[in-house]
Image (cartoon, rainbow, N blue to C red):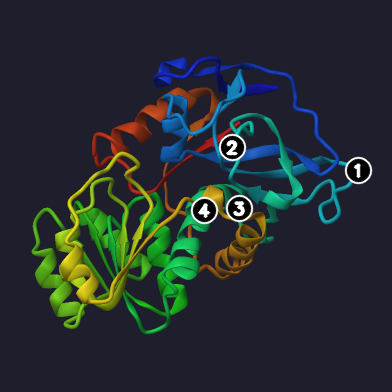
């Protein structure tokens, strides 16, 4: 099969597009014929040598996939050949990734794709969807009628956080870096979208939520906790999901006096049962049109290195040339 893989960690140029053996499946695994995959920042960190866990070599890159069941293991109970499925959490914890024509995936990490949802949508909403769901529902316990501020609402995770918050019934204010991205956020359902480069964000938050926001979702790698604390309502919750090397100052006094709480998490440490619960809601919202894939670029799998470079330019160098996800087709 064709695959995008590395034989040593390093820059995007280390990615090879070539032939690897089609994976064999275990008793509880499914062989998926891959139709679409998506790029996430963590894919680039792992490829570049982030020391989370040892990587099998050659290592197929990528976490997300959508495709069709090609074969099932002897102990698979719920999936059948021909089923359309999506999944994430591959290429993590020592597992092989998804950027290939075929992938062997544990059955409990695959979810059915609703009939009216495309492969591209399912792949693009996979990791970011489960991340947003875990943060909003398991961690923040966001409720209908509450207010949430999404710092960086036009990115891959941010666009999904905005949509899920609206599906829950929350009031949403989010930021973006140019007028077109602000307009896109409003079309996604944001009550208020603010251009952080040209507008007074603090004033916009004060006007939108005079008593402060109930939840602050941080997507950037270096949080400004003094600013964050000033935006929070009493008992406000802060969600962190980026910035592995960040060591910012923290205003302990103002934060605890408000009774606020800080929640950090990574989706790949969620149990399969927790992720399955997320997938049920995500499937319903995708099917109902409440969760739409925001796809910025589409590449053939043979251009995986270019896709990784584009992701890094936006994640690390703040190029601002992406407004959503990168999807690739094998």
Q: Which residue has dot 4 on it?
A: 125
Task: Find out whether the residues at labels 3 and 1 contact each other: C-beta distance under 8 Å.
Answer: no
Instruction: Tell me the CA gap for discs 1 and 4.
Output: 29 Å
**How many numbered tags mark residues here?**
4
Secondary element at image label 2: loop
Answer with mark 3 or mark 1, whichever residue precedes in sequence: 1
Residue at horizontal 64 percent and vertical 39 percent from the top: 35
Residue at horizontal 58 percent and vertical 52 percent from the top: 122
**Of the two numbered discs 3 and 1 in the rendering, the one whose residue sits closer to the viewer:** 1
Secondary element at image label 3: loop
Q: Is residue 326 above or below residue 113?
A: above
Q: Position of residue 204 (x, y in %)?
A: 14, 71
Answer with mark 2 or mark 1, whichever residue precedes in sequence: 1
Instruction: Tell me the CA gap for discs 4 and 3.
Output: 11 Å
Q: Which residue has dot 1 on it?
A: 74
Viewer can see residue 218: yes
Q: Is residue 251 above or below residue 96?
A: below
Instruction: Tell me the CA gap for discs 4 and 2.
Output: 21 Å
Nearer to us in this view, 232 or 67 = 232
**Of the two numbered discs 3 and 2 in the rendering, the one whose residue sits closer to the viewer:** 2
**Of the two numbered discs 4 and 3 in the rendering, the one whose residue sits closer to the viewer:** 4
The quadrant in which the C terminus is found is top right
What is the crowding at mark 2: few (fewer than 14 residues within 10 Å), some, or many (at least 20)? few
Q: Position of residue 244 (x, y in %)?
A: 35, 41
Viewer can see residue 121: no
The quadrant in which the N terminus is found is top right
Instruction: Tell me the CA gap for discs 3 and 1.
Output: 28 Å
Q: Which residue has dot 3 on it?
A: 118
Q: Which residue has dot 2 on it?
A: 93
């Amino acid at each position: 099969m064709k695959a995008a893989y590395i034989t040593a960690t390093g820059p995007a140029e280390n990615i090879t597009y070539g032939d690897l053996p089609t994976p064999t499946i275990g008793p509880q695994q499914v062989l998926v014929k891959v139709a679409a995959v998506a790029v996430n920042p963590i894919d680039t960190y792992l490829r570049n040598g982030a020391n989370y866990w040892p990587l099998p070599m050659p290592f197929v890159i990528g976490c997300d996939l959508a495709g069709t069941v090609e074969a099932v293991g002897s102990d698979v109970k719920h999936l059948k050949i021909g089923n359309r499925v999506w999944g994430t959490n591959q290429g993590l914890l020592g597992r092989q990734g998804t950027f290939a024509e075929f992938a062997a995936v544990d059955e409990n990490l695959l979810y059915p794709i609703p009939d009216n949802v495309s492969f591209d949508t399912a792949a693009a909403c996979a990791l970011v969807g489960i991340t947003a769901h875990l943060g909003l529902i398991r961690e923040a316990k966001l409720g209908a009628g509450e207010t949430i501020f999404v710092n960086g609402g036009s990115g891959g995770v941010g666009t999904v956080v905005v949509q899920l918050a609206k599906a829950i019934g929350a009031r949403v204010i989010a930021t973006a870096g140019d007028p077109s991205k602000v307009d896109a956020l409003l079309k996604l359902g944001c009550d208020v979208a603010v251009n952080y480069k040209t507008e007074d964000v603090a004033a916009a938050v004060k006007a939108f939520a005079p008593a402060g926001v109930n939840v602050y979702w941080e997507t950037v790698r270096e949080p400004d906790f003094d600013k964050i604390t000033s935006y929070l309502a009493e008992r406000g919750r802060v969600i962190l999901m980026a910035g592995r090397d960040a060591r910012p100052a923290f205003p302990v006094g103002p934060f605890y006096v408000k009774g606020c709480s800080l929640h950090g998490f990574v989706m790949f440490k969620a149990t399969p049962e927790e992720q399955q619960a997320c997938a049920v809601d995500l499937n319903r919202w995708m099917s109902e049109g409440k969760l739409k894939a925001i796809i910025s670029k589409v590449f053939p799998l043979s251009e995986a290195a270019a896709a990784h470079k584009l992701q890094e330019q936006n994640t690390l160098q703040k190029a601002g040339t992406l407004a959503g996800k990168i999807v690739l087709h094998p």
